[in-house]
Image (cartoon, grey):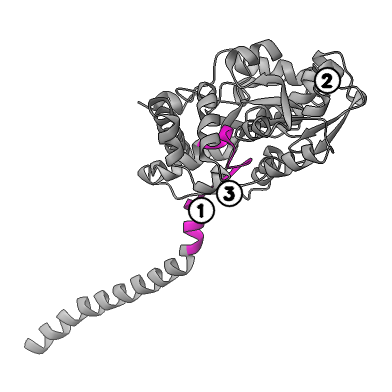
Amino acid sequence: MRRDARVFQAFPIRRSLLALGATAVAGAALALAAPHAHAADKITIMVGGINKLIYLPPKLAENLGYFKEEGLDVELQSQPAGVDAENELLAGAVQAVVGYYDHSIDLQSKGKEITSITQLLLVPGGMEMVRADLAGSVKSMADLKGKTLGVTGLGSSSSFIAQYLASRAGLKTSDYSMLPVGAGNTLIAAMKQKRIDVAWTTEPTTSILLASGDAKVLVDMSSVDGTRNALGGLYPASSVYVNRSWMNSHKAESQKLARAFVKTLKYIQTHTPEEIADKMPKDYYGGNKAIYVQALKASMPMYSPDGKMPAGGPEQVLKVMAGFNPNIKGKNIDLSKTYTNEFVDQVK
């Protein structure tokens, strides 16, 4: 009986050992697959020029620890122009982009569904600037005939805005040329070398050009009033946009991203430019923190207080783009698919 009992007890032990072996094999398989699992969980955000003040929120959110607070593994990457970031998103190399909202409309006209899930800026937050030696003869966009306009990239938001301002002044696209010069130091160099006559740029580059005396303001869209005067209405700019299919299959991640960015916008509203500057990398100052703080102070009104798309904003952007963009003119654009307040509305 004792031997039978030992035999009887051995079967469960063997079964347990077999189960443990199977678990070990499964664990090894999971370990081999782990890099892929982590890669899928990681969210890469491409920013169209990460050191520009119009794109300040993603780096600020990272440095404040807001992505980690949401349990997100976020990597920020930078491209010199929004159109380059857009291409990375379409290629599936990144999961989100911080760039101008107008790309969502432009891409829908090309059969791509991109949706903004958080609006960061109420206005473009930049200026058309003219070289100082031409300021006497170029006093408005109407004076650009035969001139070269500097833009971050062809097909970028800066090119959209420049073309619309020129068309509003009565010019055709054949009346001027556009040269892609990137942003920041490369744009400043192009201005100093007289390769461009006018350029769309944002802070802190605008403050640097003004301080050096190399350029003067031609059109100011860094404020709500200035934007309305130039374009006839608000032009919501920097946003967090994703592929609509990714958004629909990653609702939880979309919600966490929206919450992190809304918290960052609230931080901007409740802290001084000096306090915000202290949270940013020192190399963003370009060796002059005072100018950076000054530029940030001038930029504070452009940031959205809550991440929501302002009423009438999408319609105004569509109106601007349809004014010159043959891809959009006459097409039926479903604006409801280009943005959503679904996620920011749930942030307390």
Could you tell me residue 105's position as x and y percent? 69, 26
Q: Is residue 90 magenta?
A: no
Could you tell me residue 198's position as x and y percent? 79, 29
Nearer to us: label 3 or label 2: 2
Instruction: State how far apart marks 1 and 3 are (Cα).
Output: 17 Å
Q: Amino acid at mark 2?
A: Val
Instruction: State how far apart marks 3 and 2 are (Cα).
Output: 37 Å
- The answer to which image quadrant residue 213 occupies is top right
Nearer to us: label 2 or label 1: 2
- Residue at which label 3 appears: 77
- The answer to which image quadrant residue 130 occupies is top right
Q: Is residue 66 above or below residue 134?
A: below
Mark 2 or mark 1, earlier in chain: 1
Could you tell me residue 166's position as x and y percent? 82, 19
Q: Is residue 36 magenta?
A: yes
Q: Quadrant of the C terminus?
A: top left
Q: Is residue 149 left or right of residue 1?
A: right
Q: Residues within 10 Å of mark 2 (few under 14, many from 20)?
A: some
The span picked out in magenta is: 35-56
Q: Residue at point 27% right, 78% down?
A: 17
- Residue at which label 2 appears: 138
Instruction: State how far apart marks 2 and 1 are (Cα).
Output: 51 Å
Mark 3 or mark 2, earlier in chain: 3
Q: Amino acid at mark 3?
A: Gln
Q: Is residue 268 left or right of residue 283?
A: left
